[in-house]
Image: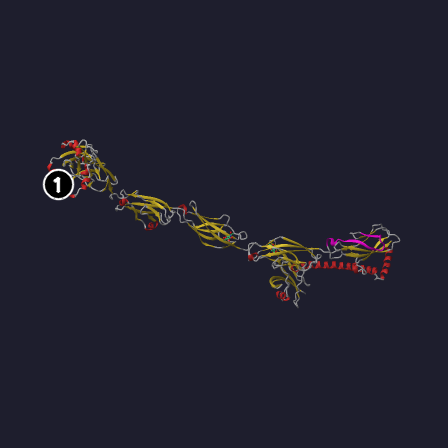
């Protein structure tokens, strides 16, 4: 119809419909068929040809067509058989979704006969659709506090089939907490509902998985399922719970700031906000609040400030855990601080001296130190010590106070300063220690005398030295310091040949150089023995002595001196000597004729003399002993030898250069004394011209012998007289007359090896009535036997003036002779002394 119909005009189409309607009215009886849906294409629907009584060939020829309503041709007519067959696969649910009876209408048009036949085809349902849910999953959120019996809508399933093939029932599987209720809606539809059969607990099961199954009534039945996921919503039904009711922690005090000491944990079974636990400190001391902090989220208690055992040994705090729903729990945290040896002992020098005299007695306090350790127990027990080998020790004076005292005598000369280290160590492990240094200077005391580098000095000095010559230098050192070590030298007093030593030598006070002050003569002084004293500048000063022995070395400065033969008048010049000797003419060779005697004031080689015959009248007749000086005949004198022989002997010493002297001897060769005398006479005559040498000599010799003899006799007489007088005075005191003479009496007294010179003076005084003039003289005799002694320094004897004596003596001439003791001041070398004088006086008649 379509292709042809379009070609027709509107008038023609309207006409066609009018004809068809009339034909429908005319042929009332319609064909009804039934066919199940979903039959394959070409399936048999009904035998139209038979039912309409049409002939098959006619059908073919007369242009028979089937026209369906709508655009889709579901049916076709099979030309050969005349059967109505399906032209398409027919889905009942698509064609008539909500219609119970699904009928398709079509027309069979027989064009040749201009006939239209109506055909109704009922499409019957088959169970080709399963019930289905729009969403395969459904989420439900149910609070755990929801009361049992509560209902929740569940998704409905849909099955487009109809009748029994459509949805018939629901069932629920999966969980005891839920049950299913199915309500019937106003349209008869079924509405599944979820009913809470049992209280939920999220903490037990947070999710419930259910399966809702929808079934139709087909055979076999088809089902569709939906998964129901019930999420249990949390309710704050659990309070946080601490893992421990009390946390006890021991913390060493040296834990660094920021360290976590303990972490408190509380758990809350709830979830989300209700299960989110936060921590806070509920109760804490003011001090603790500055030391500890609590992390609100983690519960970690960490150190905000330093712990110090010495300040706080234990802290207690209450912590609270609370969740977002306001439920909470509390726990106690007890923190015990343990001691760590973290404090160094502190040494304080309370007072100290910086200088100490070396003579300070043992036990002198040098310093007071205080020691302190803030730790407790063994960590706070402090031991103090000093270095070994210092002369100090520690004394515990009071609790933690120590005194540093000297342990023995100090000696500045050994150690002049100390750095005394006081150490303090505590008993910790490891021990902590500290130290303090006391600087101490030892002050000098004059406790060392100067010491000479040699105990005995000796030097040799050639005689005839220049005045002021340096002899030697003595040196003394003093171990002390400063003024105490300043040495000065001084010569000890002494006398040499009656003159003070200081006129011979002097020592320079500063340098110790010893100088000879005058030219020395070996022949007078062979050796000087003196003491040099070294004295330091301390108060009192200390000193020491050294002996100096100065040997004077001889020089050949004296010519030999001929003693025999004695000097002759003629031979005075040049030191020649002259004598007359007698030699018998019959003497044997070697007979001793004379001996030249000479001396030399020098010593040693310088005084070693040798004799030589320098000139002789008859050479060869005499010889001289080289060292003896003996003149002997070398041969027997002969008659022709002259009677008078003159010999010149040279005496030489061995000095360098040698000095010499000559002696001239006259030897007379005579047979007898008469001849000798004659010879002498002739000799005198011979000598008269030069000066009567021989005669004069003899005269002088005789005179000398006589004078010597007289002197000797007189001396003997004098000695006898003196002895006699002394004897008389001793036994006949007081003597009746005679002049007495004053005497000093001196004593040397030894005391402890020190030679002190003690002196008393006694004077014998003779008094005359008129002048009462006293005479003070030295004398061995005295009228007093015992004399009191009184010490006086080593000084020359004092001299008394006449007026002193006069004042001391009685004035009455009638008084008998006797003794009187008187203390008189005397001046000696510018100083004044008091001395005890005892006067023994007698009246002179
Ligand atoms: C003592 O210490 C001072 C300063 O450290 C130093 O100069 C001095 O030499 C020391 N003295 C001794 C005897 O060690
Ligand atoms: C030193 O000599 C003086 C006098 O010569 C004497 O008094 C003193 O005791 C002497 N000292 C010593 C230490 O020998």
Magenta-drawn stretch contains 619: yes
Residue picked out by circle 1: 18
Residue 194 visible in the current orientation:
no
Label 1: which secondary element: helix
- Residue furthest to the bottom: 770
Which residue occupies the extreme right position in the image? 640
Indicate whether residue 281 is drawn in magenta. no
Ligand 1 neighbours mark 1 (CB distance < 8 Å) = no
Q: Is residue 690 above or below residue 362?
A: below
**For mark 1, does the 10 Å Cα neighbourhood hold few (<14), some (14 to 19), or many (20 or more) residues?**
few
Q: Tell whether 323 sits left or right of 735.
A: left
Residue 808 in the image: state x and y as whole percent. 62, 65
Q: Position of residue 178 (x, y in %)?
A: 21, 38
Which one is in front, 479 or 36? 36
In this picture, residue 160 sits left or right of residue 677:
left
Q: How many marks?
A: 1
Name the quarter where the C terminus is drawn.
bottom right
- How is the protein colored in the picture? secondary structure
Ligand 2 resides in the quarter of the picture at bottom right
Residue in the foreground of this view, choosing between 713 and 357: 357
696 to 275, vertically: above or below: below
Name the quadrant of the N terminus: top left
Q: Which residues are magenta?
A: 603-624
Residue 343 appears in the rendering:
yes
Specify the quadrant of the image occupied by residue 683: bottom right
- Residue 797 image point, x, y percent: 64, 61
Q: Is residue 369 left or right of residue 143?
A: right
**Where in the figure is residue 107, as x and y percent of width and height?**
15, 37
For the residue pair 786 and 424, the one nearer the viewer reads as: 424
């Amino acid at each position: 119809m379509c292709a042809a119909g379009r070609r027709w005009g509107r008038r023609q189409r309207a006409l066609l419909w009018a004809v068809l309607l009339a034909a429908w009215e005319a042929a009332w009886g319609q064909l009804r068929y039934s066919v199940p849906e979903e039959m394959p294409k070409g399936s048999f629907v009904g035998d139209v040809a038979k039912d309409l009584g049409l002939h098959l060939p006619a059908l073919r020829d007369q242009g028979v067509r089937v026209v369906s309503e709508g655009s889709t041709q579901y049916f076709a007519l099979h030309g050969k058989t005349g059967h109505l067959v399906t032209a398409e696969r027919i889905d009942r649910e698509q064609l008539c979704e909500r219609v119970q009876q699904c009928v398709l209408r079509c027309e069979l048009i027989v064009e040749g006969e201009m006939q239209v036949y109506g055909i109704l085809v009922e499409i019957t349902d088959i169970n080709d659709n399963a019930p289905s849910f729009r969403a395969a999953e459904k989420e439900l959120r149910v609070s755990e506090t929801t009361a049992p019996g509560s209902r929740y809508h569940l998704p409905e399933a849909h099955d487009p089939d109809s009748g029994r093939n459509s949805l018939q029932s629901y069932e629920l599987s999966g969980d005891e907490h839920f049950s299913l209720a199915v309500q019937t809606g106003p349209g008869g539809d079924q509405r599944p509902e979820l009913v809470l059969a049992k209280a939920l607990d999220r903490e037990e099961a947070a999710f419930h998985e259910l399966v809702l199954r929808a079934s139709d009534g087909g055979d076999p039945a088809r089902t569709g399922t939906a998964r129901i996921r019930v999420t249990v919503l949390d309710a704050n039904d659990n309070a946080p719970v601490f893992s421990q009711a009390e946390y006890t922690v021991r913390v060493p005090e040296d834990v660094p700031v920021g360290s976590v000491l303990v972490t408190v944990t509380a758990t809350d079974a709830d979830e989300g906000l209700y299960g989110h636990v936060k921590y806070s400190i509920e109760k804490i001391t003011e001090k603790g609040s500055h030391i500890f902090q609590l992390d609100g989220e983690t519960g970690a208690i960490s150190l905000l400030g330093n712990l110090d055992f010495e300040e706080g040994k234990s802290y207690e705090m209450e912590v609270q855990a609370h969740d977002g729903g306001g439920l909470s729990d509390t726990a106690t945290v007890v923190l015990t601080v343990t001691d760590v040896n973290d404090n160094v002992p502190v040494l304080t020098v309370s007072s100290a001296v910086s200088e100490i005299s070396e003579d300070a007695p043992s036990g002198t306090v040098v310093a007071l130190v205080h020691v302190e350790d803030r730790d407790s127990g063994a960590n706070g027990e402090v031991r103090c010590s000093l270095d070994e080998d210092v002369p100090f020790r520690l004394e515990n004076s009071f609790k933690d106070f120590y005194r540093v005292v000297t342990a023995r005598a100090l000696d500045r000369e050994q150690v002049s300063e100390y750095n005394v280290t006081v150490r303090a160590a505590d008993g910790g492990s490891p021990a902590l220690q500290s130290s303090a240094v006391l600087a101490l200077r030892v002050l000098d005391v004059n406790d060392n005398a100067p010491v000479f580098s040699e105990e005995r000095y000796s030097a040799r000095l050639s005689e005839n030295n220049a005045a002021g010559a340096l002899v030697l230098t003595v040196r003394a050192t003093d171990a002390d310091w400063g003024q105490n070590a300043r040495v000065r030298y001084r010569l000890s007093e002494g006398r040499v040949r009656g003159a003070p030593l200081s006129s011979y030598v002097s020592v320079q006070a500063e340098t110790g150089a010893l100088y000879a002050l005058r030219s020395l003569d070996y022949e007078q002084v062979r050796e000087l023995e003196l003491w040099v004293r070294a004295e330091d500048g301390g108060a009192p000063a200390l000193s020491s002595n050294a002996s100096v022995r100065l040997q004077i070395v001889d020089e050949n400065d004296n010519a030999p001196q001929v003693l025999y033969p004695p000097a002759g008048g003629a031979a005075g010049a040049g030191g020649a000597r002259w004598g007359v000797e007698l030699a018998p003419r019959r003497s044997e060779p070697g007979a001793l004729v004379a001996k030249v005697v000479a001396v030399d004031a020098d010593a040693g080689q310088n005084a070693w003399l040798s004799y030589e015959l320098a000139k002789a009248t008859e050479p060869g007749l005499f010889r001289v002993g080289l060292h003896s000086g003996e003149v002997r005949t070398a041969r027997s004198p002969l008659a022709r030898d002259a009677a008078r022989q003159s010999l010149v002997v040279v005496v030489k010493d061995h000095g360098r250069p040698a000095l010499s002297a000559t002696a001239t001897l006259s030897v007379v060769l005579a047979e007898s004394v008469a001849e000798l005398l004659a010879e002498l006479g002739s000799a005198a005559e011979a000598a008269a011209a030069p000066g009567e040498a021989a005669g004069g000599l003899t005269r002088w010799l005789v005179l000398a012998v006589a004078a010597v003899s007289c002197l000797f006799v007189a001396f003997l007489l004098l000695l006898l007289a003196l002895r006699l007088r002394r004897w008389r005075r001793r036994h006949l005191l007081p003597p009746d007359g005679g002049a007495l003479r004053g005497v000093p009496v001196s004593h040397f007294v030894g005391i402890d090896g020190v030679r002190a010179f003690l002196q008393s003076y006694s004077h014998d005084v003779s008094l005359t009535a008129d002048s009462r003039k006293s005479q003070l003289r030295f004398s061995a005799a005295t009228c007093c036997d015992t004399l009191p002694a009184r010490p006086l320094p080593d000084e020359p004897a004092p001299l008394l003036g006449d007026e002193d004596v006069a004042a001391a003596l009685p004035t009455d001439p009638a008084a008998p002779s006797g003794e009187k003791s008187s203390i008189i001041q005397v001046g000696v070398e510018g100083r004044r002394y008091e001395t005890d004088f005892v006067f023994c006086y007698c009246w002179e008649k």
